[in-house]
Image (tube, rainbow, N blue to C red):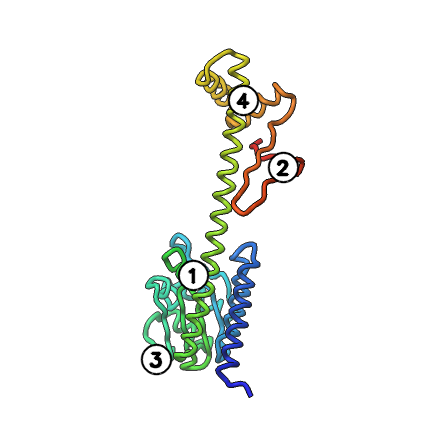
Amino acid sequence: MMADHDLVSDDLATGLKELTRTLVAACDIEQAWDEVAAIAARMVPEQSMTGVTLRIGGHVRLVAASDKTVARIEEAQHRSGCGPGLEALDTAAPVSVPDIGAERRWAECRAEMLAEGIRSLHCEPLITDGAPTVALNFYSKTPYAFDHRARQLITIIAAVVAAVVAAATAAARQAELSEQLRAALASRSVIDQALGIIMGRERCTRSGAVAILRDVSQRRNTKLAVVAVEVIRSCTGADPEDLHFNEPGRSPVPPGKRTGSQHPR
């Protein structure tokens, strides 16, 4: 017979795998929060309900709720400008209330919680980029629902979610930077080709060719790279050759296997 702690460990492992898979598979992290809230609510005992609050640039909003009751409670916090979820974000520390009936903080949203039958809660901030930007807020209609073991479980859930979100955010930033660099290199190459053509045509120096290209760009109110493409096209009768940049871990693109033009149009 399997011990209870083994069953708990199996349930925890299954839940964490589900959370990780959901976040990794999401094209946009924000689209995954509803499922994250539902999974997290199932992982924590005492029929808990979960809300996810996101803060960006001082603006706080509810991005997911496992239950309509939670949505109303979270909105009450946002209206009043105070509450356990907001406090968790402000202090970057967990906020736990074993019995809402005995709590004296957050008068407006506390009244909303009691009216909705909420008796205990635990709010856990997610630290990404060194600051709390997300709060996982757990609510229960049972007093003292979030004991030491439940709070430990929530801490583990929050740590895993924060790590995956941070990794996904970093990957997205890296992809954006790589694309910006790719575009900049392609643009520079096209401009260099155009300058060579102008220098040959006008028998001028590179600085003179730059002045000519800039003058046309300013008069037309058109990007320099776009004018450069037109110069190349007027000379060769074709668009500039596609540029290919090999990224670490990727094989070079074979000739004839181009994936599309990299120069700006």
Task: Give the class, few, some or many, for how many residues have Cα within 10 Å of label 2's Cα (few <14, many ≥20).
Answer: few
Q: Earlier in the sequence, mark 1 or mark 4?
A: 1
First reached walking from the N terminus: tag 3 or tag 4: 3
- Residue 80's x, y, as percent? 38, 64
Q: Secondary structure at mark 2?
A: loop
| Amino acid type at mark 3 | Ala
- The residue at which mark 1 appears reads as 134
Q: Are marks 1 and 2 in contact (CB under 8 Å)?
A: no
- Tag nearer the camera, 3 or 4: 4
Instruction: Mark 1 or mark 2: name the one nearer the start of the chain.
Output: 1
Asked if the residue at tag 4 contacts the one at tag 1, i.e. Cβ–Cβ closer than 8 Å, the answer is no
Residue receiving disc 3: 102
Q: Which residue is mark 2?
A: 260
Q: Amino acid at mark 1?
A: Val
Expressed as whole percent of the image width and height from the top left, the position of residue 203 reads 50, 11
Depth check, front residue: 79 or 128: 128
Q: Name the mark on residue 45.
A: none
Q: Residues within 10 Å of mark 3 (few under 14, many from 20)?
A: few
Mark 4 belongs to which amino acid? Answer: Ala
Work out whether 18 lies above or below 119: above
Q: Which residue is situated farthest in the top direction here?
A: 203
Between disc 4 and disc 2, whose residue precedes? 4
Structural crowding at the residue carrying mark 1, measured as other residues with C-alpha within 10 Å and reported as few (<14), some (14–19) or many (≥20): many
Residue 187, x across and y down, in percent:
52, 31
Q: Considering depth in this image, is 247 or 167 the residue closer to the camera? A: 247
Q: Which SS class for mark 3?
A: helix
